[in-house]
Image (cartoon, grey):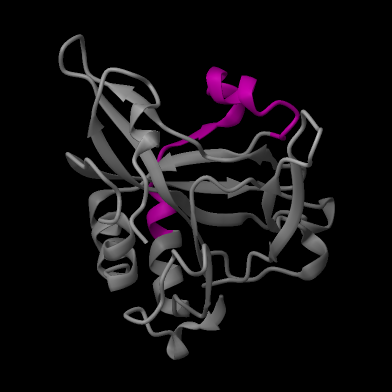
Amino acid sequence: MRVSFADFDPAAFSFHGDPVLVLDNFWSGDERRLFREAMGRSSWRALEDMPQVHAAFPDCGNWRKAAIAMPEVQRLLARLAFPCIERYMESFDGITGRSLSFSYYSYGAGDCLLTHDDLADGPRGGAGALTTVERRLALVSYFHEEWETDWGGELMIYSSHWPGGSDRIKLTLSHCVAPEPGSLVLFTVPQYHRVCRVDPLVGEHKRLSIAGWFLTEHAGTGRYEAAQATARR
């Protein structure tokens, strides 16, 4: 579903019925400015300074990432108090805890993100106290002041299936979401997606976003044990 935030009914919407939600005009200009000011106070790391991430996403430019301070986390969560999010997050079996993981991102000319599906975050804790963490809902929201069509940086989301007799998954583009200032995207995990390369026409402008996940925690001893938990429709 794609709809203006002013026309959105968070009580009626269901991620079980529609796994991708795009809300236009979610943030006002003043709210975006406050987040950009907070980004300016943040400490940023470049992709080349994150060896594991860089290895997983080679040839993706050198986009930057920063932690979000607590006041901005609280501001974000206050705006995301949607019944549809709560219902979806509570629909999985065996939940022992809930967590969040959001960061700032800055993409400039030449930056992109390769196709991936955001699957399980994996185990936490030592022997005898293992918790498996699963990404359930992905979030992307945009805070730059302007963005032109020719600048690229679109979020591409794909549906997937295994063709008969094939050993390779087939991806079909289901959503092409331009990084419109103030928009918010939420989609269920796993879904294959990527960020298109930002064109040199962008000049010094940056694609500024918050991205991350709502997660559930589960007791278990296997890395993907919690992935067996099925959502109750």
Answer whether residue 60 is magenta in the image.
Answer: yes
Observer-nearest of 227 and 5: 227
Q: Quadrant where the N terminus lies?
A: bottom right
Q: Position of residue 63 (x, y in %)?
A: 62, 39
Q: Is residue 100 above or below residue 58?
A: below
Looking at the image, can residue 26 be seen? yes
* Residue located at (56% from left, 18% from top): 51
Q: Position of residue 205 (x, y in %)?
A: 68, 58
Q: Is residue 185 above or below residue 231?
A: below
Q: Position of residue 82 (x, y in %)?
A: 30, 71
**Image side of residue 178 versus residue 165, left or right:** left
Give the tally of numbered discs: 0
Q: Quadrant where the C terminus lies?
A: bottom left
**Image side of residue 229 versus residue 58, left or right:** left
**Image side of residue 89 versus residue 167, left or right:** left
Q: Give the residues drawn in magenta, as a range.
A: 37-61
User: Image quadrant of residue 88?
Assistant: bottom left
Of all residues, the one furthest to the bottom in this rendering is 7
**Image side of residue 157 versus residue 9, left or right:** right
Observer-nearest of 23 and 110: 23
Observer-nearest of 209 and 185: 185
Q: Position of residue 6 (x, y in %)?
A: 44, 89
Of all residues, the one furthest to the top in this rendering is 127
Answer whether residue 58 is magenta in the image.
Answer: yes
Looking at the image, can residue 197 be seen? no
* Residue located at (56% from left, 56% from top): 208
* Residue located at (20% from left, 9% from top): 127
Observer-nearest of 6 and 69: 6
